[in-house]
Image (cartoon, grey):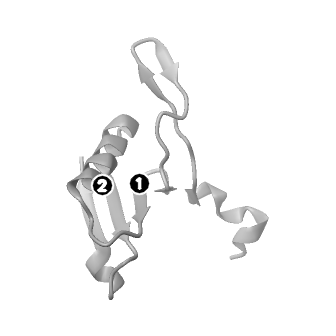
Amino acid sequence: MNCTSGDCASSTNRRYPSYMYGDLRIEAGYRVDLIVEDLVIVELKSVAKLLPLHQAQLLAYLKLSRRRVGLLINFNVPHLRQGIKRMAN
């Protein structure tokens, strides 16, 4: 599949979602790295060590977007599987 022509936009994309606070709609309240199939939030990092702050950030994104599953991926590890953390809301 050729993603350069925009064919992949429906399955994986970068968005800046809005959320509702009472009757007020707040635009671009947070910056999600990826949302896959409109189900999974993927937060990408390249840090020496994942901190509780990174997990709290992903958890906040999950709660605000009302999604249940997220992946926190750190690319600064010897083997990528060591840098993947699955989180559920």
Q: Which residue is mark 2?
A: 54
Say above or below: 80 vs 48.
below
Q: Position of residue 45 (x, y in %)?
A: 40, 65
Mark 1, secondary structure of its residue: strand
Residue farthest along the left direction in this orientation: 52
Count every numbered label the image shows and give the total: 2
Residue farthest along the right direction in this orientation: 5
Residue type marked 2: His
Residue type marked 1: Ile
Residue 41 image label? 1
Q: Quadrant of the N terminus?
A: bottom right
**Near-viewer residue (12 or 21):** 21
- Kindly tell me whether residue 38 is visible in this rendering: yes
Q: Of label 1 and label 2, which has the lower sequence position?
A: 1
Q: Residue at x 57, y 47 (%)?
A: 15
**Near-viewer residue (51 or 63):** 51
Residue farthest along the bottom direction in this orientation: 78
Crowd band around label 1 with a 10 angstrom C-alpha radius: few (<14), some (14–19), many (20+): many
The reply, left or right, for residue 25 in relation to residue 63 is right
Say above or below: 9 vs 64.
below
Mark 2, secondary structure of its residue: helix
